[in-house]
Amino acid sequence: MARRKDHTREELTQLAIQCGRDIVVAEGPSALSARNVTKLMGYTPGTLYNLFENIDGLTAAINTTSLINFAETLRCILRDHAKPKKRLSKIAQAYLEFQLREPHLWTLLFATPIQHDSEDYRTAIHLVFDQVTEVLLPISKNNKVARQNAKILWSTLHGICLLRSSGKLDVSEADPSEELVKRFLNQYFKL
């Protein structure tokens, strides 16, 4: 076991987030527990509760990291593509790819309820959501409509990903999620 003085509080926090993330990636959100995280860290479970109020605090910290990473993906899309419709299509594609590439992190972020609120978590959410709203502003009437359209877009993408991951998307026949998203974007946003 490591000793408390082996790491600063900040180092311990980052270690806990990384170990928690590694557990989620390998075993899924249900494996995220204080005992599993601290065992991987080489500390006792009490150490985790000195860093986070509860397991939801750690979950939010892991989700914050995922949101920051996804926000960077969106920044690259906005940098590389000037037209709103192309940006929107690429954002939708990136969301689908995130769910396929990191299904357990996606589930932790979008399909696992948590009771946690912090400034860092809210800021990370807005790093993603505000960029999508920005993309939708030119094809929406105003900021309020753009924000509502962003929610409609995320809800649709989320629903498709959730059904795809549960094996319930292809109830009667196979329909690629990318094709369904493309049809939605064409119909709703007139892409």
Image (tube, rainbow, N blue to C red):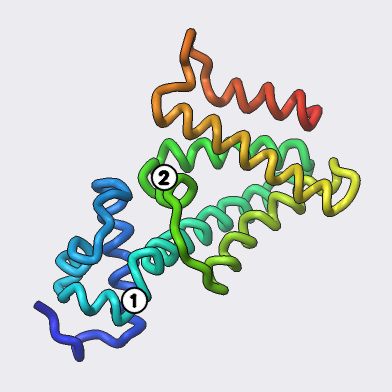
Q: Is residue 170 above or below residue 158?
A: above
Question: In the orientation shown, which residue stands out farthest toward the bottom?
Answer: 5
Residue type marked 2: Thr
Mark 1 falls on what kind of element?
helix
Specify whether 100 is left or right of 92: left
Residue type marked 1: Thr
**Residue 171, how many percent across, how many down?**
47, 14
Question: In the orientation shown, which residue stands out farthest toward the top?
Answer: 172
- Report the residue marked by disc 2: 107
Q: Quadrant of the C terminus?
A: top right
**Residue 134, how many percent across, how many down?**
76, 53
Q: Quadrant of the N terminus?
A: bottom left
Q: Is residue 139 above or below residue 163?
A: below
Question: In the orientation shown, which residue stands out farthest toward the left?
Answer: 1
Mark 2 falls on what kind of element?
helix
- Give the label on residue 13, or none: 1
Residue ID at (16%, 75%): 43
Specify whether 120 is left or right of 48: right
Residue ID at (49%, 38%): 97
Real-space Cα distance between discs 1 and 2? 22 Å
- Give the label on residue 163, or none: none
How packed is label 1: few (under 14 Cα within 10 Å), some, or many (20 or more)? some
Front: mark 1 or 2: 2
